[in-house]
Image: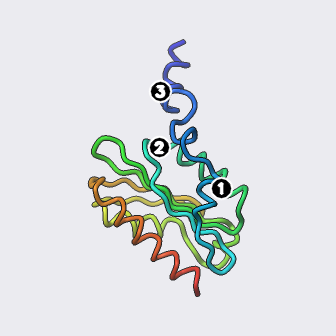
Amino acid sequence: MAKESRDLKKSGGGAPAAAMTVTADQLLANAQEIGGAKLVVEEIPGGSQDALRLLIDQVRKKADPSAILLASRADDKVLLIAAISKTLQSKGLNASDWVKHAAKLVDGGGGGRPDMAQAGGKIPGKIPEALEAGKQFMQGALAK
C-alpha cells in the first residue's frame, strides 16, 4: 500500500487534473497552422507535469508535424514543457532551445532532448509573456 500511495502522489493522485479540463482536441482547435505544422502554445491551469506530458502525447498522435509549448503554475513556481515532432526535428528545430527561450521570461531555465524539454521558473505572473515569446520564437522558426 505504501508503494501505491507514493505512486499516486507522484502521478498527482490518479487522473491528471488538467487532462479532465483540457483535451488535445481543444488544444488543436486553438492551434495556429504555419507551413503545414500545428503550433500549440497554451497555459493549462492546474496542470501537473504528468498531465502536461499526457496532453503533449495526445496532441502529437493527432497532429504531425506539430510544435507544442504548455505552461502551468503551482504555488509560486512555473512549469514549461515543449515538444517538437520528429518531422520538425529533421528541419533543425529543437524543443530544448525553445523551452530555454521561453523560460528566461519567468526567471527560469531548463532543457532536455530535441523532441521534448522541460523548464521551471520563479515568476508565475509572467507566464503569458513567456508563452508569447515562445510562440513568436516558433513562428519564426516554422516560417523559414
Q: Look at the numbered disc 1 and give the secondary structure of its residue.
A: helix
Location of mark 2 (residue): 47
At x 63%, y 60%, the residue is 28
At x 43%, y 42%, the residue is 46
Q: In this view, does 67 lie above or below 124?
A: below
Alpha carbon separation for disc pair 2 and 1: 15 Å
Between residues 138 and 92, which one lies in front from this camera angle?
Answer: 138
Q: Which of marks 3 and 2 is nearer the N terminus?
A: 3
Q: Which of marks 1 and 3 is in front?
A: 1
Classify mark 3: residues with Cα within 10 Å, few (<14), some (14-19) or many (20+).
Answer: few
- Residue 19's disc number: none
Pinpoint residue 126: horizontal percent, then vertical percent: 30, 60
Q: Earlier in the sequence, mark 2 or mark 1?
A: 2
Pinpoint residue 24: horizontal percent, then vertical percent: 63, 52
Q: In this view, does 56 lie to the left or right of 102?
A: right
Q: In this view, does 52 lie above or below 29?
A: above
Location of mark 1 (residue): 59
At x 40%, y 59%, the residue is 110
Q: In this view, does 53 lie above or below 2?
A: below
Pinpoint residue 95: horizontal percent, then vertical percent: 53, 66
Asked if the residue under mark 1 is in contact with the one under mark 2, i.e. CB atoms within 8 Å, the reply is no
At x 56%, y 48%, the residue is 53
> Which amino acid type corresponds to the residue marked 3 in the rendered image?
Lys
